[in-house]
Amino acid sequence: MDNILSFPTSTIVSKPVPKNAFYGRSDDSSLREFLTREFEGIVWLYKLAPATLNVEDGEYVHEIDLFYCRMKENEYSIKPFCAMDELLPRHTVFLIEYGGKFDLLMHHKEISFVHGEQKWKCGVSELKRDIRIEVNTLNIQGQSMDAVYNGLLSQISGLSASTREEYKEQVDVRKQIESIQKQIMTLQKRIKAEKQFNRKMELNTEVRQLRKEMTLLTEKLKKNNI
């Protein structure tokens, strides 16, 4: 493939990756089924590393690989991508093409140790849907691999976090907002079904209070993203 994201030429790999490079590392038969059923092909597009970017090595991030995944159908499942990602001992970004559209998928990954063995664990899945390649190109920013990683994560998630601690804090706020939204929707359904006027008023009061909480959290998130 050509340099689809206009990254520095020093980062280009453009190497097809056989599907068994992923499922061959796993005992999960469903992953092989997923790759065979849904994937047309995989290409290792870019390798972002100190040597290819001329930046300092990071404390947590040493390499970021970007894979182009062409899907067979017009929709796809996100969850198995996490299983794929956890098999790779480095940070990754997926550019997913399906039905003529492009998405960017990135998991917040961290290393843990289980019985002395190093394991990579995926956290939150950040998905930027239906991007326009010619417009929504990812920008590589920062003088260290940690900074480059945080920059990519911020662009895909829409959260402006310069450190992993800031990212986790903002994700927590975002989860609180989503939880309140679900509570409001549930209460609104109860209000419609409620026959007693007084009880409707009580439920409406709860909704107003939740909306105030959501407004404060939203303002907090926007303030962090200025």
Image (tube, rainbow, N blue to C red):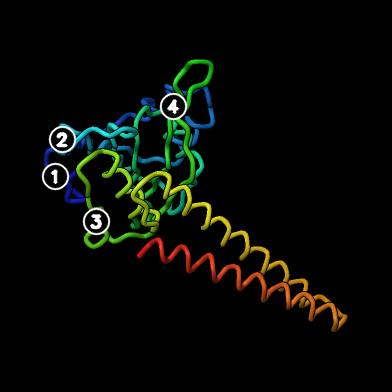
Q: Earlier in the sequence, mark 2 or mark 1?
A: 1
Residue 23 tag number: 4
Secondary structure beneath dot 2 equals helix
* Mark 3 lies on residue: 137
Residue sitting at 77 percent across and 71 percent down?
A: 190
Measured in 3D between alpha carbons, the distance from the residue under mark 4 to the one under mark 1, in whole angstroms, is: 30 Å
Q: Amino acid at mark 1?
A: Pro
Residue sitting at 33 percent across and 50 percent down?
A: 162
Q: Amino acid at mark 3?
A: Thr
Measured in 3D between alpha carbons, the distance from the residue under mark 4 to the one under mark 3, in whole angstroms, is: 30 Å
Secondary structure beneath dot 3 equals loop
Local packing at callout 2 (Cα closer than 10 Å; few below 14, some 14-19, many 20+) is: some
Q: Earlier in the sequence, mark 4 or mark 1?
A: 1
Of the 4 image quadrants, the one containing the N terminus is top left
Local packing at callout 3 (Cα closer than 10 Å; few below 14, some 14-19, many 20+) is: some
* Mark 2 lies on residue: 52
Measured in 3D between alpha carbons, the distance from the residue under mark 4 to the one under mark 2, in whole angstroms, is: 28 Å
Residue 190 tag number: none
Q: Amino acid at mark 2?
A: Thr
Measured in 3D between alpha carbons, the distance from the residue under mark 3 to the one under mark 1, in whole angstroms, is: 12 Å
Q: Amino acid at mark 4?
A: Tyr
> For the residues carrying marks 2 and 3, which lies nearer the camera in this image?
2
In the image, farthest residue toward the bottom: 197
Above or below, 20 against 123 in this view is: above
Of 39 and 120, nearer the camera is: 120
Residue 224 occupies which quadrant of the picture? bottom left
Q: Earlier in the sequence, mark 4 or mark 3?
A: 4
Above or below, 14 against 95 in this view is: above
